[in-house]
Image (spheres, rainbow, N blue to C red):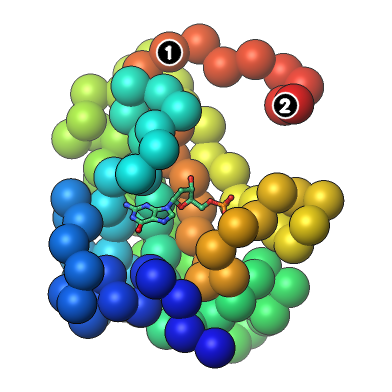
């Protein structure tokens, strides 16, 4: 089932898009938890990380990590470090069932997460 992120991909609803290529898109989170909080999503509709298979999705995963590094560099958070998070299902705190990687930076993160 499609989510709000599909509407962002199709430009049916607006988002602050910071990166896009044929495989992935990235835009600022509507509810930022850090000075830089960007969501990196595949254009393909994959609900959760559980559907990811290394062999099938290798190129897509590479594209998501390349996007993260490129955006981090552009946002000026690469040097001091950042956090990448993928929430999965209920216990992981997933709210939107379209795979997405959170890129968080611009402040010191805590560990363990809440
Ligand atoms: P998660 O809990 O990992 O499923 O995170 C979903 C994130 O998506 C959450 O941080 C808020 C963000 N979000 C939800 N709806 C929208 C939207 O319409 N636009 C944008 N930019 N972000 C959204």
Q: Which tag, 1 or 2, sits closer to the chain's start?
A: 1
* Residue beneath the point at 71% across and 59% down: 88
Residue 69 in view, yes or no: no
Mark 1 and 2 residues: CB-CB less than 8 Å, in contact?
Answer: no
Compute the Cα span from label 1 to label 2: 14 Å
User: Would you name the residue on which mark 1 appears?
Assistant: 107
| Residue 110 sits in quarter | top right
Position of 61 with respect to 32 (left or right) is: right
* Residue beneath the point at 41% across and 64% down: 41
Mark 2: is the Cβ under 8 angstroms from ligand 1? no
Above or below 29: residue 78:
above
User: Would you name the residue on which mark 2 appears?
Assistant: 113
Mark 1: is the Cβ under 8 angstroms from ligand 1? no
Q: Position of residue 48 (x, y in %)?
A: 64, 71
Position of 114 with respect to 13 (left or right) is: right
| Residue 15 sits in quarter | bottom left
Q: Position of residue 84 (x, y in %)?
A: 53, 40
Above or below 79: residue 88:
below
Residue 51 in view, yes or no: yes
Above or below 2: residue 5:
above
Above or below 86: residue 6:
below
């Amino acid at each position: 089932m499609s989510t709000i992120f599909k509407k962002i991909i199709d430009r049916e609803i607006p988002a602050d898009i910071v990166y896009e290529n044929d495989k992935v898109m990235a835009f600022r989170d509507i509810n930022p938890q850090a000075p830089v909080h960007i969501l990196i999503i595949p254009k393909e509709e994959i609900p959760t990380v559980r559907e990811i298979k290394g062999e099938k999705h290798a190129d897509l995963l590479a594209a998501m990590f390349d996007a993260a590094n490129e955006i981090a560099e552009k946002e000026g958070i690469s040097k001091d470090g950042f956090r990448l998070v993928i929430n999965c299902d209920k216990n992981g705190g997933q709210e939107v069932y379209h795979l997405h990687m959170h890129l968080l930076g611009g402040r010191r993160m805590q560990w363990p997460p809440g």
